[in-house]
Image (cartoon, rainbow, N blue to C red):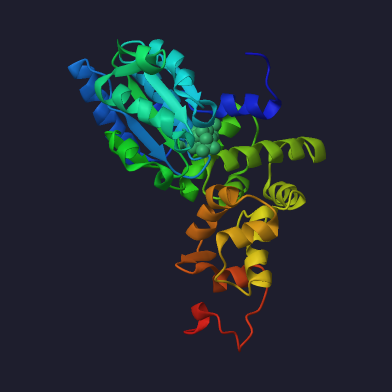
Amino acid sequence: MGPGPPEEENDIALRPKRIADMVGQRDVIDVLRIAMDAAAKREEPLGHILFDGPPGLGKTTFATCIPREMGVSVQLASGPSLKAPKDILPYLTNLEERSVLFIDEIHRLPKTVEEYLYTAMEDFRIDIVLGEGVSARTLNLQLKRFTLIGATTRAGMLSGPMRDRFQIREHLGFYSLAELSEILTRNAKKLSVQVDQDACAEIARRSRGTPRVANNRLLWVRDYALSKADGRVTLPIVEDALKMTGIDSLGLDRQDRRYLETVIRVFSGGPAGIEAIAHTMNVSADTLVDEVEPFLLRSELIVRTSRGRCATARAFAHLNISVKPDDQHPLFESQ
Ligand SMILES: Nc1ncnc2c1ncn2[C@@H]1O[C@H](COP(=O)(O)OP(=O)(O)OP(=O)(O)O)[C@@H](O)[C@H]1O
Ligand SMILES: [Mg+2]
């Protein structure tokens, strides 16, 4: 692998290597430890695992730590790049006993590939059709017993049969401030940068509950401190650095605020359909659903109703937009 862009290198450097180095997600780790322990004792492959949750919460980190813990090899693949059964064939034939095949964005696997995986997951076997028409023959290929680890930002987009073939299904949720602070403290040490405690807490507070965001903020703040001061990260440095890149007090970035402004100003606070919001903002609805909405929902800045998305009173207050007294918005009836 050639030298990647600096961001990517830092991402690799900061990514935990072992599960013991991972912060938070205790419930998930407890389940995995038991499953790994039992699989090792039975000398069997670990059951197939599905991770779901918003971007940057540790799905790929888990998928790379697990094989390391088990002492088995891992192959990495991604849903969108597996366009036809023949694309997944090399991965399946390269499997070693008890090894891991990781498929990222597994909800984007085409139906034909997904169906092909069913027998591989269930019976460690695939049927390859050779030739066409009357001369077509089916070749039965026995595979090594392996573990499939799937990752998705949208568990809901996975078909029922696919979902049911995973023995372990774990949802990764947002991280607490204490957990993010812990991750930042560890990574500041790895990067040999001095970060004051209150500065660390402030970065955590503005990281949208997401380790990847926390790491990116840390890297930016580190550069800012080095360029504008003596390299030490203090609270005023964090405030100035984040202000410069448009990160506000809740950790929202420009795109997050544009979403809220669109719902509030264009759609009078909602309810507004996601397609309409996406169209107005000129971004894809998928991006909004996967990357923007989870944290806004968690922060109670928006709510999802059967008729669409609504901005809450908290969102109006955060953007400093007052709610008109005659507002007919259903959310404010009781306020
Ligand atoms: N539990 C954790 N403890 C410490 N750092 C973590 C943890 N989870 C994630 N990180 C950090 O956050 C970064 C992003 O995590 P990761 O790549 O695993 O997210 P992801 O869920 O796969 O995201 P995506 O959906 O975008 O692929 C990692 O490089 C790692 O440095
Ligand atoms: Mg990932």
Question: Splitting the image into 4 quarters, where does residue 124 fall?
Answer: top left
Q: Nearer the viewer, residue 86 or 329?
A: 86
User: Is 205 placed left or right of 73 in the picture?
Assistant: right
Which residue lies most toward the front here? Answer: 134
- Which residue appears at 43% of the width and 34% of the height? 111
Count all numbered tags in the image, as a single digit. 0
Image position, residue 204 (x, y; %): 56, 47
User: Is 14 placed left or right of 233 in the picture?
Assistant: left
Which residue lies most toward the bottom here? Answer: 326
Q: State whether residue 156 appears in this view.
A: yes
Which residue lies most toward the left here? Answer: 42
Instruction: Work out whether 92 lies above or below 317.
Output: above
User: Is 261 placed left or right of 227 in the picture?
Assistant: left
Question: Splitting the image into 4 quarters, where does residue 229 fall?
Answer: top right
- Which residue appears at 29% of the width and 17% of the height? 125
- Which residue appears at 62% of the width and 72% of the height? 316
